[in-house]
Every structure is written in C-alpha cells, then in structure tokens.
C-alpha cells in the first residue's frame, strides 16, 4: 500500500467520511504547498500536547497553562478541569449526559443550559453484548458517586434515534439504584427534537424547547 492509499484509508475511518471523500481530501492536500502540509502536520502533532481530557466531565479541551512565581522560580501549572466544570457559577446540581463532545458543544453554544455535563464517549447499539465497553461506565459511576450529595437531576441528553434511546435505557437502568437512594430525578430531553435527530445538527430554538420540555 502506497502513501496515497494509506492516507485514504486513514481519512475513511473518520465519522461520516467514505472512500470517495477520503480520496478527494488526499488529492486536495497534494495540490497544496509545503507550508500548508507542514502546518497541518504540526497542528495534528500539537493535539496531544495542547488538548487534554477534563478529569470530571471527560470532554476534550484546550489546556490552560499558568505561570507563577514561587520562591523566585517561575513554574507552569495546568488545571485538570475544563472551564465549565471549574465554574462555580454553574448549577452543579443538574447534570446532562451527552454521547459526544460535539453534542456538548452544541448544547453549550445554545446557551439554554446552565448545569454541568458528562460525556459518555459513544453509544450502546441495540443487542450489544458488552455495553460497558462502548461508553465510559466506570467513569460515570465514579462521577455520580463523587457528586451524589449535590445532584438533584440528571438529564439524558442523547440523540433521539434507536441507538440513542437504547443508550439512555441502559444508563437509566445502570444508575437507577443510586439515584433512587439519593432521590435524584432523571429526565429526558422532551418535545422539540424529532425522531432521528442528532444534537450536533439541531438548531438553537429546537434545543431550547427540548430542554424546557424535558420529561
């Protein structure tokens, strides 16, 4: 397999990208100058250095390094929490579970939700035999246990399609004993989202209605 075919295969693994689109990407890159390719490769290399996962919600975010003096010596530090989780003005009693980082960004951009999030990292397909391997089950349990005394409501902010609903059902059954014990309400995004909708592509007004009418 030559360089072109290898890159086509890599791009084909991207969500929503087929072999034909992947091939177009590769040939587009071949028409660009050396500076463009160098910048692209450097940005990709910087991803792992500059982007980290939040310790609480598990979203990826741009790390913030702060310099300060201690005994005359300047040191670099970085927080382990994203700005949402670290924001004391957010309502930490309301937690929304979303499937992907893109879903979190869509809800956050809408501005109608003032609580906190947890990114499941995927979905649970129907008839999946090992659902615990498809989403962050252990991290979710640890997060709920850590915050159970503060939580009042958990919103299942999943895509309204069969796979999303199956994910919501699995998570609800998983958390039910703990939530009932601690009297935490669990709700779903309500009317406003049509069947088959994905949060990433939902407009602001529809999201506001879904949040307002959650059930």
Image (cartoon, rainbow, N blue to C red):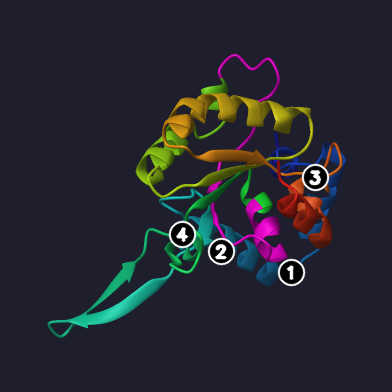
Report how far apart the C-alphas of labels 2 and 3 lie in the structure: 20 Å
Q: Relative to 209, is 50 above or below?
A: below
Residue pushed farthest front?
A: 183
Observer-side mark, 2 or 1, equals 2
Observer-side mark, 1 or 3, equals 3
> Is residue 128 a member of the stretch shown in magenta?
yes
Which label number is shown at residue 11?
A: none
Q: Could you tell me if residue 121 is visible in this image?
A: no
Q: Quadrant of the N terminus?
A: top right
Labelled pair 4, 1 in contact (Cβ < 8 Å): no
Q: Quadrant of the C terminus?
A: top right
Lower sequence index among marks 3 and 4: 3
Report how far apart the C-alphas of labels 4 and 2 lie in the structure: 29 Å
Query: Which residue position is annotated with label 3?
Result: 22
Q: Residues within 10 Å of mark 3 (few under 14, many from 20)?
A: many
> Is residue 119 a member of the stretch shown in magenta?
yes
Lower sequence index among marks 4 and 2: 2
Q: Which contiguous range is marked in magenta?
A: 104-130
Determine whether, in the image, residue 180 is placed left or right of residue 165.
left
Query: Which residue position is annotated with label 1?
Result: 33
Q: Secondary structure at mark 3?
A: helix
Q: Residues within 10 Å of mark 4 (few under 14, many from 20)?
A: many
Q: Could you tell me if residue 36 is visible in this image?
A: yes
Query: Which residue position is annotated with label 4?
Result: 85
Query: Which residue position is annotated with label 2?
Result: 42
Determine whether, in the image, residue 109 is placed left or right of residue 140.
right
Labelled pair 4, 2 in contact (Cβ < 8 Å): no
Q: Secondary structure at mark 1?
A: loop
Lower sequence index among marks 4 and 1: 1
The residue closer to the viewer here, 151 or 59, is 151
Q: Residues within 10 Å of mark 2 (few under 14, many from 20)?
A: few
């Amino acid at each position: 397999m030559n360089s072109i075919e290898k890159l086509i295969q890599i791009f084909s693994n991207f969500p929503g990208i087929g072999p034909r689109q992947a091939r177009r990407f590769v040939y587009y890159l071949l028409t660009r100058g050396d500076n463009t390719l160098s910048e692209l490769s450097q940005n990709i290399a910087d991803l792992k250095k500059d982007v980290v996962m939040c310790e609480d919600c598990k979203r990826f975010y741009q790390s913030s390094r702060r310099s300060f003096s201690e005994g005359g010596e300047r040191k670099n530090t970085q927080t382990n929490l994203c700005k949402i989780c670290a924001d004391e003005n957010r309502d930490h009693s309301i937690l929304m579970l979303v499937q992907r980082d893109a879903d979190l960004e869509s809800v956050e951009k809408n501005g109608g939700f003032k609580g906190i999030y947890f990114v499941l990292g995927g979905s649970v397909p129907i008839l999946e035999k090992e659902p615990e391997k498809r989403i962050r089950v252990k991290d979710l349990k640890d997060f709920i246990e850590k915050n159970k005394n503060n939580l009042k409501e958990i919103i299942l902010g999943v895509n309204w399609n069969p796979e999303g609903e199956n994910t919501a059902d699995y998570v609800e059954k998983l958390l039910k004993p703990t939530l009932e014990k601690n009297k935490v309400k669990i709700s779903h995004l309500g009317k406003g989202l049509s069947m088959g909708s994905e949060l990433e592509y939902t407009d602001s007004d529809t999201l506001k209605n879904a949040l307002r009418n959650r059930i």
